[in-house]
Image: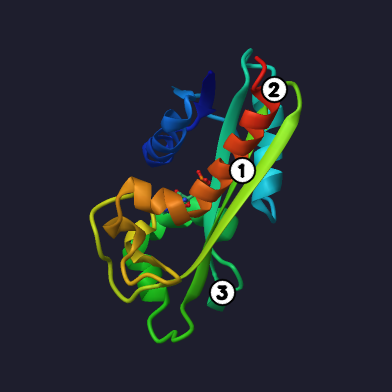
Amino acid sequence: MRVLFITSNKGKFKEAKRYLSPLGVELIRGRVDYPEIQADDLEEVVRFGLEWLRDKIDTPFFIDDSGLFVEAFGGFPGVYSAYVFKRLGNKGLLKLMEGVDYRDAYFKSVIGYYDGEIHIFRGIVKGSIGYEKRGEGGFGFDPIFIPHGFSRTFAQMTIEEKNKISHRGRALKAFSNWLKENLQNE
Ligand code: IMP
């Protein structure tokens, strides 16, 4: 089956394609800019995005909104992750964390699929913020995020390794399980 992923983020698309292709899902990338409202949680942002997009797209599609939540900062940058990454980058976030010993953080991803109704899938990965950038892979905050149980950052992993444990990989797992159960007769 074919599924449309509306995203301007190449990294997200690559990860989703790598995850879904072996399951027989042909992923198509759609580039439609949609408003990302300021809200307290990712799910609200996703719901608004789906409602805005649904009249403009005539096939089922999904979007992904994600963010990095640093515990010592009360979850910041969280829903503001894209803006903070653009303005400060990894270097800026590391600078903000100078002198901070409590470095726990988590990534969260919310996938919203629209097929006439809204379906929401979530994934979280816990980890910590390193003291320097490491690795060339991935995108965004990957070079400074070390998932719990590993010594490497996400940027030092292959897409497959990251997908097995990441927030997006987990949300994609829930999404693909749902697709299998609900669309097997189509
Ligand atoms: P948005 O989902 O488009 O609002 O963007 C979220 C921002 O969070 C991205 O620009 C990245 O900086 C960051 N982000 C989200 N997911 C990941 C990831 O898997 N790795 C690294 N950074 C991420």
Which residue is at the far right?
117
Which of the pair 29/27 is nearer the observer? 27
The extreme left residue here reads 136
Sooner in the amino-acid sequence: mark 3 or mark 1: 3
- Residue shown at 25% from the left, 65% from the top: 134
Disc 3 residue type (three-letter): Glu
Q: Give the answer, above or below, for where 44 lies relative to 18.
A: below
Say left or right for 180 vs 5: right
Q: Tell me which colouring the rendered structure shows.
A: rainbow
Label of residue 71 in the image: 3
State the SS at label 2.
loop
Tell me: residue 104, above or below residue 79: below
SS label for mark 1: helix
User: Pointer 2 and pointer 3: residues touching (CB < 8 Å)?
Assistant: no
Quadrant housing residue 181:
top right
Q: x, y percentage for residue 10? A: 37, 36
Image quadrant in which the C terminus is located: top right
Residue 86 shows in this picture: no
Crowding near pointer 1: few (<14 within 10 Å), some, many (20+)? some
Residue where numbered disc 2 is placed = 115
Callouts 2 and 1 close, C-beta under 8 Å? no
The residue at the point 69 percent across, 56 percent down is 40
Disc 3 versus disc 1: nearer the observer:
1
Q: Residues within 10 Å of mark 3 (few under 14, many from 20)?
A: some
Give the residue pinned by disc 1: 174
Estimate the spatial distance between the alpha carbons at disc 2 and disc 1, rounded to whole Å. 16 Å
Would you say the residues marked 3 and 1 are in contact, meaning their CB atoms lie under 8 Å apart?
A: no
